[in-house]
């Protein structure tokens, strides 16, 4: 069952990504991007990361892609805008990309992951994700642990282990990100505000 | 033998009692869930379209449908559906035909999937997840994507306007929707819709809407925003029959057009049920003795009947909200798009932020007290739900050597549930 | 029934990453380039979450991917504002036309 679901989601994610590359119409690209990102959210659910998957759906698919399509609508100078990329650069990029992909996948397949996992387990102890604890992580209930981790307390790591030093949380990054979002909000509104259009002679 | 009605999950029942293999049991349980949900997905559309016709007729001093299906025209929706199925499936030459055909399915799938996370009664939920509310809102927001794609791919200026308006409207309503939906989460301490609902048992002053003045106002903000999210008047800018012909669905006909309507009425019902679970006491009747009788009884028959009663209560409550939506549609004039964005961004966002802060302050300063300073016992129920949600050993396991900053926070968070329970 | 190891997820992440890079390199539409960036970040996210499940790091990977998602949304908003500004000045969003700063 797991293999079957993984195959479906992985195929949809990769197929969507490849379709984004090959498609020339921007809105279709956005549609394929939605398929790819949505299936990635499915992969996240399979990895028992339910909160990350939900965030992916809400922010990426529901927010960012809608924003992108909105941008396409605001900047399209004709119906079904296509800006073709030159075939030469396409072939070159695909060749380089395929080489890189082979290199990465080859590296991934060469690593002895099981041995590595055993070694790490000997070093750090068993992953607390599988332990019964504050939440059943194995079933994907990660919300509370992520919430407390963002506030600085690590239930996923410190539960039931007599640690000399509690693990570091994510309170400071969380605050920085929230200030960052405020800056982005103001900055984007400032950049995109309506201005008098400079008249450039159009070529088409 | 454990009866099916009292089993925890269908797949457990099939594996334990009938000796099915795991995969087969999971697959058939999934099919049963989808069939049940499909029924509750189609039912609101069926009832909603008929109610829309009847209510609008009465409001406009007409009778509405009277003949189809005998009295009251109650089979009108079915007649509409059959008529729509027979229609020719057209698409314009100028359309991007792939996207044009796919868009209605995106809308209907998004609307249907959201029902997976909706508890219809205590534990009557297809998927009880800790991120239930978050995920439901996320999936509901995918519906907008289908509408924008439909508007863009139709190749018609009316549709394009409809799609653009929907995109602009979505950017403005999502923010207050998120903030007002977070307020009950803040009070309940969980995003699991089942737990949020369970916490409002007992007398009706335990319902989150009556908890404090802020949540009461938050419910009305939430309701206004859900009107916008369903494209109901006065926020129906995306379809605006009198300005944009049909808005995003101008070019659609027959089956695909009916999919849009199916999704619209289903998500109307969905957001109403969400509002009921978040603010209006979910599936509880609001009269403590009745609920407690069904809840504390040992017999599974009585428990099951209690769940059926809760289901009926949830249906009735959310039908009233749907009725309210229809009533508002036929009473209020439509806003302009700039007025919609002003309403949502300029007024509702600050208001909902203020309500959020107010609800936070209220729960810090008057813990466990509801509207008229009645001790609602909400905290006890919260602790009870938290203990149900996590295994018993979790509190005792937290032991970190040094009383450092993070350490004390750890202890504080883990023990707060315990202390509330003792209190 | 055998489960999927970390390799499968890493391979998916690699495919997403490479597709994103190709997209960034070849698309001339500014918004297409943005979609490439999203794909690249998404490929990285798959790796983060996969290591969070299969490694000893607890939820670190998931939290990192949360930050990536949030920052990607912020990046998309700013980039879109820049694209709109560019369109206001040039009446196109073809990135090859943004060549005024060439010497």
Image (tube, coloured by chain):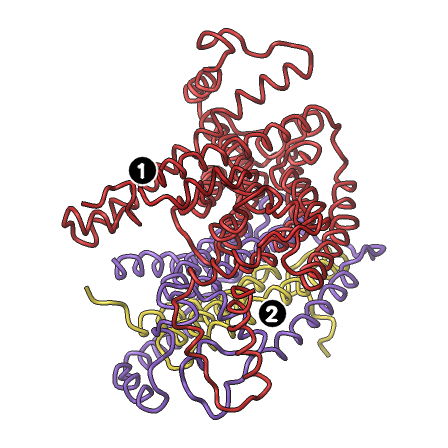
Chain colours: A purple, B red, C yellow
Q: Quadrant of the N terminus of chain A?
A: bottom left
Instruction: Please give left or right for residue A11 compared with residue B148 in the image.
Output: left
Above or below A166: residue B49: above
Above or below C77: residue B136: above
At 73% from the left and 79% from the top, the residue drawn is C103
Subunit bearing disc 2? C
Residue highlighted by disc 2 = C71
Dots 2, 1 in contact, CB < 8 A: no
**Residue B240 seen in this snapshot:** yes
Above or below B370: residue A104: below
Q: Who is closer to the viewer here, A95 or B69?
A: B69
Element class at badge 1 = helix
| Disc 2/disc 1 C-alpha distance (Å) | 52 Å
Residue B271 x, y percent position in the rendering: 56, 40
Subunit bearing disc 1? B
Instruction: Please give left or right for residue A16 compared with residue B154 in the image.
Output: left
Q: Who is closer to the viewer here, B169 or B319?
A: B319
Residue B95 x, y percent position in the rendering: 53, 36
Q: Residues within 10 Å of mark 1 (few under 14, many from 20)?
A: some
Q: Furthest residue to the left?
A: B19
Residue B212 x, y percent position in the rendering: 70, 50
Quarter of image, res B154? top right
**Residue A89 seen in this snapshot:** no
Q: Who is closer to the viewer here, B193 or A28?
A: B193
Residue highlighted by disc 1 = B301
């Amino acid at each position: 069952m797991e293999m079957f679901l993984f195959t479906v989601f992985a195929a949809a994610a990769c197929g969507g990504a490849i379709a984004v590359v090959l498609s020339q119409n921007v809105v279709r690209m956005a549609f394929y991007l939605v398929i790819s990102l949505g299936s990635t959210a499915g992969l996240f659910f399979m990895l028992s990361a339910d909160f990350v998957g939900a965030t992916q759906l809400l922010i990426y698919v529901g927010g960012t892609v809608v924003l992108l399509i909105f941008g396409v609508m605001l900047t399209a100078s004709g119906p079904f805008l296509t800006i073709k990329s030159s075939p030469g650069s396409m072939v070159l990029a695909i060749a380089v990309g395929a080489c890189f992909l082979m290199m990465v996948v080859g590296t991934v397949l060469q690593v002895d992951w099981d041995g590595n996992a055993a070694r790490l387990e000997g070093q750090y102890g068993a992953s607390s994700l599988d332990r019964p604890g504050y939440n059943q992580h194995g079933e994907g209930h990660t919300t509370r642990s992520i919430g407390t981790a963002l506030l600085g307390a690590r239930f996923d790591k410190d539960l039931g282990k007599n640690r000399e030093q509690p693990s570091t949380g994510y309170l400071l990054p969380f605050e920085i990100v929230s200030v960052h979002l405020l800056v982005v909000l103001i900055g984007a509104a400032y950049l995109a505000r309506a201005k008098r259009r400079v008249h450039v002679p159009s070529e088409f | 033998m454990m009866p099916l009605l009292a089993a925890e999950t269908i797949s457990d029942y099939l594996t334990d009692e009938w000796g099915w293999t795991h995969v087969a049991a999971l697959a058939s349980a999934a099919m049963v869930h989808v069939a049940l949900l499909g029924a509750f997905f189609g039912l609101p559309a069926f009832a909603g379209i008929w109610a829309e016709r009847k209510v609008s007729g009465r409001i406009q001093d007409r009778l509405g449908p009277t003949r189809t299906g005998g009295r009251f025209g109650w089979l009108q929706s079915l007649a509409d559906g059959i008529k729509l199925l027979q229609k020719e499936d057209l698409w314009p030459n100028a359309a991007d035909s792939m996207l044009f055909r796919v868009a209605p399915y995106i809308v209907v799938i998004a609307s249907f999937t959201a029902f997976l996370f909706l508890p219809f009664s205590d534990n009557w939920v297809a998927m009880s997840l800790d991120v239930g509310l978050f995920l439901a809102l996320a999936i509901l927001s995918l519906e907008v994507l289908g509408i924008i794609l439909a508007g863009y791919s139709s190749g018609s200026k009316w549709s394009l306007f409809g799609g653009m308006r929907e995109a602009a409207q979505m950017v403005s309503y999502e923010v207050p929707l998120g903030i007002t939906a977070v307020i009950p989460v803040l009070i309940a301490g969980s995003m699991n819709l089942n737990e949020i609902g369970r916490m409002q048992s007992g007398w009706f002053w335990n319902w989150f809407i009556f908890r404090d003045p802020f949540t009461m106002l938050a419910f009305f903000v939430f309701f206004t925003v859900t009107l916008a999210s369903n494209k109901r008047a006065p926020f129906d800018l995306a379809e605006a029959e009198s300005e944009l012909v049909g808005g995003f669905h101008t070019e659609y006909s027959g089956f695909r057009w009916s999919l849009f309507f199916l999704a619209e009425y289903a998500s109307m019902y969905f957001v109403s049920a969400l509002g009921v679970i978040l603010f209006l006491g979910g599936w509880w009747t609001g009269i403590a003795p009745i609920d407690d009788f069904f809840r504390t009884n040992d017999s599974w028959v009585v428990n099951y009947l209690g769940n059926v009663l809760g289901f009926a209560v949830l249906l009735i409550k959310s039908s009233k909200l749907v009725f309210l939506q229809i009533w508002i549609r036929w009473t209020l004039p439509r806003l302009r798009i700039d007025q919609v964005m002003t309403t949502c961004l300029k007024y509702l966002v600050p208001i909902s932020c203020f309500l959020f802060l107010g609800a936070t302050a209220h729960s810090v300063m008057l813990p466990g007290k509801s509207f008229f300073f009645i001790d609602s016992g909400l905290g006890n129920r919260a602790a009870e739900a938290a203990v149900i949600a996590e295994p018993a050993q979790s509190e005792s396991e937290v032991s970190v050597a040094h009383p450092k900053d993070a350490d004390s926070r750890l202890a504080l968070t883990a023990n707060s549930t315990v202390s509330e329970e003792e209190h | 029934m055998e489960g999927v190891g970390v390799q499968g997820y890493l391979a998916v992440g690699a495919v997403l990453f490479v597709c994103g890079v190709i997209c960034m390199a070849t698309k001339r539409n500014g918004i297409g380039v943005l979609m490439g960036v999203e794909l690249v970040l998404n490929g990285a996210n798959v790796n983060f979450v996969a290591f969070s499940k299969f490694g000893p790091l607890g939820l670190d990977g998931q939290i990192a991917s949360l930050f990536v998602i949030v920052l990607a949304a912020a990046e998309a908003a700013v980039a879109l504002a820049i694209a709109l500004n560019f369109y206001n000045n040039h009446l196109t969003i073809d990135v090859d036309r943004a060549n005024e700063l060439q010497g």
